[in-house]
Amino acid sequence: MSKKYIIAKSLASLALLGALGSSAFANPTSTAKTKVVPPPSLIDSLTLAYAAQYFGPSITNPTYATSDATNDGNLTDTQNLDNTFLGGYKLTPHSEILGNFRFVLETYTKNQVQDLKIRDPWISYRDRKFYSNGPFNVNLDVRLIFPVAPNSRGNLNTGIRSTQIATYSVPSTRLTLGTFTFVRANVLRGDVTGLPNASFNFSSFANYQMLPTVGATLWSDIVQIDYWFGNDIENYAIPVSPGVNWDVTPNFSLNPMLTFYPFANEPSWEKTTIGLFISARIL
């Protein structure tokens, strides 16, 4: 699987987490008549959600998808549906403890073979208002990763990852600008070469809210680095993904998008792919 598949799903998971609001919490403030508001019930304090990202075909060839393993944007016949279930407990209206279960359904379009792959789960502490000042907000997520996936068992003791999402809502406009960064360190078992010692990602994004439930989106993974001790650092190809986000209901949204590689050696429509991000909040 290409690096983009790994990174993009990380973004998808956090994009969903950003949509998890605090409406389930009762308002603890009292009225002028000192009306007592009951504390939230257990069900009000729980979080349950689902996110999926479909990595679809080339827009000119429905049997192929684009890999960004090199700047050439080589074509492959693999298309993926990356699924994540999230569950957790709200500590405050803007912070929570979360866990996940993630699996990827791969379809090889040439021979119609499907493969189910389990990914490493994690437990995280997340604060959606780690720092907030007017239109500027920083969202913090710190994860402890467990080696469950086949390529992790026997190779990885654990992984630690810190993710930051910074957003700025431009005053008097419908435009929101943001950055997404994460740093991950892996604690490996012995002299392992199949997993990196560390990873770093820097992405930028924008959303223009055209209608109350429809926004134009733009995302680009500018820096995507995996580092092995003793090796040179090399960035992966830079994808750009314009799309449209539609809040079908307050708890369900769809975000179709196109992904292309403008800095590839030979950019083309054939190397532009269709994708879809789905998010749903159950609790």
Image (cartoon, rainbow, N blue to C red):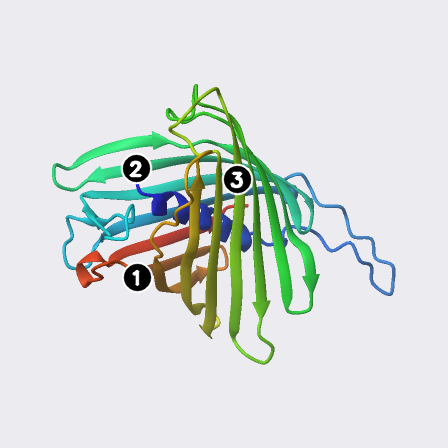
Categorize mark 3 by other alpha carbons within 10 Å: few (<14), some (14-19), many (20+).
many
Residue 163, percent from left and from top: 56, 47
Q: Which mark is residue 263?
A: 1
Tag nearer the camera, 1 or 2: 1
Provide the residue designation for mark 2: 105
Residue 22, percent from left and from top: 63, 53
Categorize mark 1 by other alpha carbons within 10 Å: few (<14), some (14-19), many (20+).
some
Disc with the residue nearer the chain's start (1 vs 2): 2
Rendered view: 195 above or below 126: above
User: Which residue: 48% across, 33% down?
Assistant: 197
Kindly state the secondary structure of the residue where label 1 is placed: loop
- In this view, the residue farthest toward the right is 33
- Mark 3: which amino acid? Arg
Residue 51 appears in view? no
Residue 253, percent from left and from top: 43, 57
Provide the residue designation for mark 3: 184
Disc with the residue nearer the chain's start (2 vs 3): 2
Residue 215, percent from left and from top: 43, 69
